[in-house]
Amino acid sequence: MGYLSNVTSVFKKETKSYFYSPMAYIILGLFMFISSILFYFFNLSNSIGTLVWMFNQPIFALILIMFISILTMRMYAEERKNGTEVLLFTSPSKVSSLIIGKFLAAYFVFIVMTLLTLTYPLVIMIFKGKFTIQMVGGYVGLLLFGSCLIAIGLFCSALTENQIIAAILSFIIMFFLFIVGSFATMFGGAVTEILKWVSLFYRYSDQSTGIFRLNTMVYFISITVSLLVITVLVIEKRRWSQG
Amino acid sequence: MIEIQNMSKRYGRVHAVKDLSFTLEKGEILGFLGPNGAGKSTTMNIITGYIPPSAGTVKVCGFDVMENPFEVKKRIGYLPEQPPLYMDMTVREYLSYVCDLKQIKKSARKSQLDHVMELVKITDVSGRLIKNLSKGYKQRVGLAQALIGSPEVLILDEPTVGLDPKQIIEIRNLIKALGKDHSIILSSHILSEVSAVCERVVIINKGQITAIDTPENLSKGMDESLKYTVSVAGPQDSVKSILKGIFGVRKVETLSTKDNDSSDFAIESNKETDIRKPMFFELAKAGYPIMELKLNDMSLEDVFLQLTDNDVVMPNSAVSEDKSKEDETEEDKTADNIEETAEKKEVE
């Protein structure tokens, strides 16, 4: 009994509530529907055998952003709105264990989402294509990118008690990080470097071409972890300042 | 069990509670009484460690809330004003999640759950989704949540809100029974509830304590005269003059006149003399039958109103006379309050 069991119980509870409500099914279904259309247009109709090319499309990232902001919007905002935050804070468990549990639950849904897209390489293989190491690289990139997006969404959800505002806020932040890479080259010099550094999508497309880069992985993981830490701090701080 | 010393909570410039000090003894049920916005919930939130105090110390079972929050939280069961329920879980799922949060050992869980559900009588709804339960049941599930882990201290913020009269009595009895093993703080604005259940009452107004005493002492301390309501059939004026003539009667007031010639009167008399017998004979002699006679106790309600609302003019002038007979500390506090209100008015 302790920290870890708290994390697992929060994880279990949150995952259950995703799959007991229509939430997870709608998100998974819609995501599969839209990504299948993309798969058809980018891969099948052009007879392109590399899935990487599809993952690399900006529109795919945009869809991810949209779905993840919906997936994460209620995570913390709902606790505040329903007053269940009190239960969490008056029980002998740490805020960080809750946040990690919640993060893992959303990440679990995301992993299910990713697993479903494995049908695409399957289809490619049926059509005599090859499952390449680039695809594995692409999937690793996708999983890392997803963890960042979920951490952003969770952070935004902790900022407000309104789910819609949380969704919009996280969408805006993710969208900014998404387009900032395209602006990067406009400035040149240090500014470009900084913007490229900030741009999640730039990193993501780099990784999703199938190249394993250690610094990219470290980048995504450290962004995720620091966002989770900031989320915990935001929640603690609010409690201390206003109650 | 709980020791609160000079606790204050500020929101910006506004004091939600100011300089609160009281204690909760082991096995005691303490009523926490006050009008809406008096700072009841704030105080409870601070004791349970949900929000930190701005100043002062709160100790639960010897542990400081600020220094040892985990030890404190292990020993407190809290039912907030709005029960913290997850609507999309079944009762059993929810309670077992609470067990997880409260770090109940896996081996003890089942018996713990069954025991608590039995106690608040929700065993028959254990498989239902919380969102489909009635308000009364939701409240009970909230109470069950507080009871899990059998904490030494229970803090209940308006536990009977939204229950039907039968359920209210059940919950009250339950709280009374729980008082044997737990120390309980119970907040309410329903006075009959507090006087029925609690051994001691803290009355709080505008963030400050106005009185701490047993319910009996509180009503006794205020009540220096006896009040009756009597309904007599007969001409109003002559009945009134007869009533006034009875020894011991201080004041007679006409309340209303009914169609069938009977009138209602409010009578105040000295506490020492029982005016009921002479009243009966006098009125009988004059041929005016008594239709109804009732002795009105000064309820905790009146005490409460008097202590918490200085702006309201009490209908009975005797009450304001009684004020002078209160013990000094209480009077000081009331006086402080009046000053405060006066200051506020000046500012406005």
Image (cartoon, coloured by chain):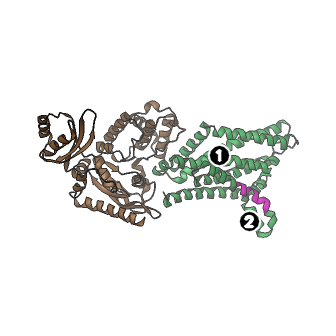
Chain colours: A green, B brown
Amino acid at pointer 2: Ile
State the CA–CA distance, disc 2 to disc 1: 29 Å
From the top left corner, tell me how far across and down residue B288 is, in percent. Answer: 17, 34
Query: In terms of secondary structure, where does tag 1 sit?
Result: helix
Check if mark 2's residue and mark 1's residue have beta carbons within 8 Å. no
Magenta highlight: main SS: helix
Q: Chain of mark 1?
A: A
Dot 2 surroundings within 10 Å: few (below 14), some, or many (20 or more)? few
Amino acid at pointer 1: Leu
From the top left corner, tell me how far across and down residue B243 is, in percent. Answer: 16, 43
From the top left corner, tell me how far across and down residue A98 is, in percent. Answer: 54, 50
Res. B180 in view: no
- Identify the residue at image location x=67%, y=49%: A69
Q: Chain of mark 2?
A: A
Res. A19 in view: yes
- Identify the residue at image location x=64%, y=40%: A23
Q: Quadrant of the C terminus of chain B?
A: bottom left
Residue A111 highlighted magenta (yes or no): no
Magenta residues span: A173-183
The residue lying furthest to the bottom in this view is A189
Res A71 label: 1
Q: Which residue is mark 2?
A: A194
Dot 1 surroundings within 10 Å: few (below 14), some, or many (20 or more)? many
Q: Are marks 2 and 1 on the same chain?
A: yes
* Front disc: 2 or 1: 1
Query: In terms of secondary structure, where does tag 2 sit?
Result: helix
Q: Toward the viewer: A78 or B59?
A: A78
Q: Toward the viewer: B71 or B178?
A: B178
Q: Image check: A220 left or right of A96?
A: right
On screen, A139 above or below B343? above
On screen, B170 above or below B223? above
- Identify the residue at image location x=69%, y=40%: A28
